[in-house]
Amino acid sequence: MTTLIETLKNETESLRIQYLEMTQNWAKNNFAKMQESKFLYTLNGKYFKNCFGKTKAEDAMINRTATILNKGIEIYISELKKDAENHYEISILKLASRIEEKGLNVKNLKTLTSHIGVNIETTLTDGIKNVKAFTIIAEGIIQRPHYRYLIK
């Protein structure tokens, strides 16, 4: 399985780089939006609540926003990039186990990878069986970039 994991990592390196870049850009934009929060005020460079939320969830969100802003943008970006890197590693392990379930002969494995927009598609074959693995990446103004692999 380790050779399959290494093969998948080599084939999807462009996905990893693109995903980390998307996460970093989203983090910068999200941090800027948090700085504009009407629920916070600054004093000596620190953020504090200027009101309480109507619900516990809103109050928790205000506290979380203040905590993130007080840490600073560099720490926020590095934490999100670390989460993205962990997501990439876990998704590769899951993908490898799902491919192994298909019964491909890893010794004769050949791969073909292509980028289609922001998504990636990898075809794996051992000469007898073919498996297609492809990603669906989603992101938005509010939603942090994320993806998952689908297999045919």
Image (cartoon, helix red, strand yellow):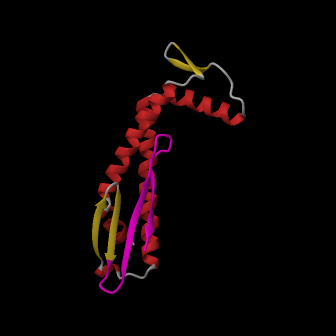
**Percent from the top left, x then y, of residue 73?**
43, 30
Displayed quadrant of residue 59 = top right
Residue 135 is covered by the magenta coloring: yes
Displayed quadrant of residue 52 = top right
- Relative to 107, is 99 on the left or the right? right
Residue in view at x 61 percent, y 29 percent: 62
**Percent from the top left, x then y, of residue 142?**
50, 40
Residue 106 is covered by the magenta coloring: no
- Quarter of the image containing the C terminus? bottom left
- Quarter of the image containing the N terminus? bottom left
Please state the extent of the stretch shown in magenta in the rendering. Answer: 125-152
**Which residue is outermost to the top?**
44
Residue in view at x 31 percent, y 80 percent: 107
Q: Is residue 41 above or below residue 6?
A: above
Q: Is residue 62 above or below residue 152?
A: above
Q: Nearer the viewer, residue 49 or 115?
A: 115
Q: Is residue 105 above or below residue 138?
A: below
Residue in view at x 36 percent, y 84 percent: 129
**Percent from the top left, x then y, of residue 94?**
47, 66
**Percent from the top left, x then y, of residue 106?**
34, 78
